[in-house]
Structures are given as structure tokens and as C-alpha cells.
Image: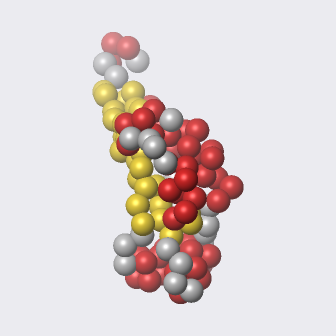
């Protein structure tokens, strides 16, 4: 789900949301996990986004998770041209390539009723 949509959902639920941290990880148990997402994608769910590990390393190079959190929307834009669908990610995993995904932690504070 795009970070902008996550933030919009936070606002719609009455919270002032922001991205606290933003990072990435290599997909663990890729055949099982990516395979599951690929099945869901074939059934019309998603989209699900994976990325080549070398792209993730390059985009996040030198950034702390907090600094990346402050730049999360921009980083997401930089990653967009490199998105891989779950079906494509599974094909890469089956060829022995490593794929990863982003991880965001949302920081939300309840908006007081008086401010609504």
C-alpha cells in the first residue's frame, strides 16, 4: 500500500500520522512468502511490491531508519521505477535472485475531538 494512502487512512481514522521509520529487508523464506503473494496476485489481489536487493541497498545507503522515515515519501518515489510484482519476484527467486521489500512504521497521535 502506498505510504500516502497509509497516512490518509490515519487521518480518516482521526489520527495525525507520520512515518516514524522506513527501512527495507531481504525477503525471508522467499519461496513460501513470495509464492503466497504471487498466488494472491494471480487471484486479483494486490498489487504487492518487491524490489531487487541491490536497488534497496543503493536507495537506502547511508540513511538511518529515522532519516529514511523523514524522507519516506521521496524514497518511495525513487523506488517506484524498480517495483517488481509478486509474480515477477517469484520468478527471480526461483532463479536464485534475492528480492526485498520496504518496511514502514507509522507514528500516529489521536487528534483531539475539539480539533476536528
Q: Nearer the viewer, residue 18 or 5?
A: 18
Classify 45 as above or below 63: below
Residue at (55% x, 49% y) in the render: 59
Q: Residue 81: x percent and y percent?
A: 68, 55
Q: Is residue 8 visible?
A: no
Specify the farthest residue to the top. Answer: 114
52 left or right of 103 in image: right
How many numbered marks appear? 0
Figure quadrant of the C terminus: top left
Q: Is residue 27 visible?
A: yes
Q: Residue 73: x percent and y percent?
A: 55, 39
Classify 112 as above or below 98: above
Q: Nearer the viewer, residue 63 or 112?
A: 63
Residue at (42% x, 69% y) in the render: 27
27 left or right of 74 in image: left
Q: How is the image coloured?
A: secondary structure
Residue at (39% x, 27% y) in the render: 16
Location of residue 70 by image quarter: top left
Residue at (31% x, 28% y) in the render: 109
Q: Residue 33: x percent and y percent?
A: 41, 76
Amino acid at each position: 500500500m502506498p505510504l500516502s494512502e497509509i497516512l490518509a487512512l490515519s487521518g480518516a481514522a482521526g489520527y495525525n500520522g507520520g512515518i516514524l521509520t522506513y527501512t527495507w529487508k531481504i525477503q525471508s523464506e522467499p519461496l513460501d512468502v513470495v509464492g503466497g503473494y504471487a498466488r494472491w496476485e494471480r487471484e486479483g489481489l494486490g498489487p504487492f511490491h518487491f524490489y531487487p536487493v541491490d536497488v534497496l541497498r543503493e536507495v537506502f545507503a547511508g540513511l538511518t531508519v529515522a532519516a529514511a522515515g523523514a524522507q519516506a515519501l521521496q524514497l518511495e518515489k525513487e523506488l517506484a521505477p524498480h517495483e517488481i510484482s509478486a509474480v515477477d519476484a517469484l520468478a527471480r527467486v526461483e532463479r536464485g535472485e534475492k528480492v526485498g521489500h520496504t518496511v514502514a512504521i507509522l507514528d500516529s497521535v489521536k487528534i483531539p475531538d475539539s480539533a476536528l
